[in-house]
Image: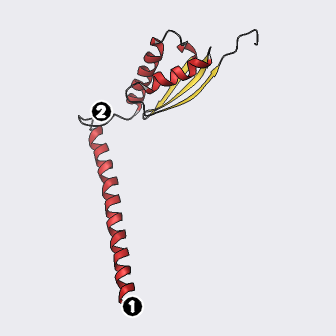
Amino acid sequence: MRTSKALELAVIAWFVTASTTAWSQTAGAASASASAQGASGTAASGATAPVGRKADRALRRRVYAAIGKDKEISAGDISVITKDGAVILNGTVTDVAQIGKAETITRGVSGVTSVTSKLTVKKPLGGM
């Protein structure tokens, strides 16, 4: 009987400790995010990366610029969608190799956390 009571108390203590640790991590992340946003919505120094529409637009511009620098990729047929560091590439390219190259270039852009490619190869009008 004593062993089961001690085991029960140990399990309860473990749950309380785990719950407290999880709660403090979530609260710490939320308060850090709120303080990083500040009153003006810009990131404070020491923040990992700004979030929101402005940051998404800036990241999208950086990705477009990086892809546009590569002369082998026709960037005019590629659209870029960004959301909190995640990038989706849509559109068409003229060669299969350009898909991988566009993904590699995008991954190299500062602030990109993931890349999803929905690029396809545009077939010439002759159909071959």
Is label 1 or label 2 in front?
Answer: 1
> Which residue in the protein does label 1 denote?
1
Identify the mark at residue 42; answer none if there is no mark. 2
Label 2: how many Cα within 10 Å (few below 14, some 14–19, many 20+): some
- Residues 123 and 23: in front is 123
Determine which quarter of the picture holds residue 34. top left
Label 1: how many Cα within 10 Å (few below 14, some 14–19, many 20+): few
- Vertical comparison of 66 with 22: above or below: above
Distance Cα–Cα, label 1 vs label 2? 59 Å
x then y, percent, for residue 121: 65, 19
| Residue 119 placement, left or right of 115 | right
x then y, percent, for residue 17: 32, 67
The number of numbered badges drawn on the structure is: 2
x then y, percent, for residue 91: 60, 21
| Residue 48 placement, left or right of 116 | left
| Residue 94 placement, left or right of 82 | right
- Vertical comparison of 11 with 89: above or below: below
> Which of the two discs, 1 and 2, labels the residue nearer the N terminus?
1
| In contact (CB < 8 Å): disc 1 and disc 2 | no
Determine which quarter of the picture holds residue 10. bottom left
Identify the residue at horizontal 73%, vertical 10% (top origin).
125
Determine which quarter of the picture holds residue 47. top left
Identify the residue at horizontal 76%, vertical 9% (top origin).
126
Identify the residue at horizontal 53%, vertical 14% (top origin).
75
Identify the mark at residue 108; answer none if there is no mark. none
